[in-house]
Amino acid sequence: QVQLVESGGGLVQAGGSLRLSCASSGRTFSSNDIGWFRQAPGNEREFVAVIRGISGATYSADSVKDRFTISINNAKNTVYLQMNSLKPEDTAVYYCAASSVSGRFYTSRLMYQYWGQGTQVTVSS
């Protein structure tokens, strides 16, 4: 069982930065892929970025890859999402999720078995 807790959301002006954290209790991240997703009101939950715990390899959505960086601290069992140059369209609830499915990186939320409760990010113009 993996329990995930996100933190670090808040209100920031356009062009600003935030760092989200996803902490895990239970199984360690080294056996999982950890992804970040986001969901704005009225929209589907969309993939943002993913990191493979055992190797640190990453993959990010085109819309964020030049602005957001995903990283992991295995000693702290924590995954981070550093978000720079934030835009109003980045406003959403951000969720971290864990997948134990091996193979390629997955961008579908259906491939992730464990989810945190989400943290709100609001970017003002």
Image: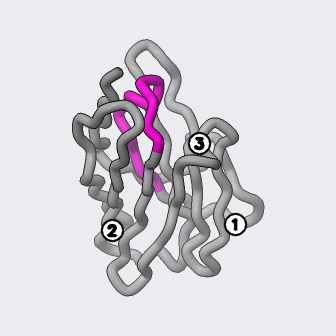
Residue with the mark numbered 3: 64
SS type, badge 2: strand
Residue shown at 60%/75% (left/top)? 56
Q: From the viewer's perspective, is 74 left or right of 64?
A: left
> Is 23 part of what is drawn in magenta?
no
Residue shown at 30%/30% (left/top)? 122
Cβ–Cβ under 8 Å for marks 3 and 2: no
Give the x, y percent position of residue 25: 29, 71
Give the vertical position of 40 relative to 78 (above or below).
above
Give the x, y percent position of residue 83: 44, 49
Give the x, y percent position of residue 108: 64, 40
Give the x, y percent position of residue 31: 54, 76
Q: From the viewer's perspective, is 84 left or right of 54?
A: left
Give the vertical position of 48 relative to 44 (above or below).
below
Which tag is nearer the camera, tag 3 or tag 1?
Answer: 3
Hey, what amino acid is under mark 2?
A: Ser
Residue shown at 65%/63% (left/top)? 58
SS type, badge 3: loop
Nearer-N-terminus badge (3/1) = 3
Give the vertical position of 14 relative to 24 (above or below).
above
Residue shown at 38%/66% (left/top)? 1
Give the vertical position of 70 relative to 26 (above or below).
above
Residue with the mark numbered 1: 102
| Along the viewing direction, whichever of 59 and 31 lies nearer the viewer | 59
Furthest toward the bottom, the residue is: 75
**Span shown in magenta:** 85-97
Q: Residue 24, which numbered label? A: 2
Distance in Å between CA atoms under marks 2 and 1: 19 Å
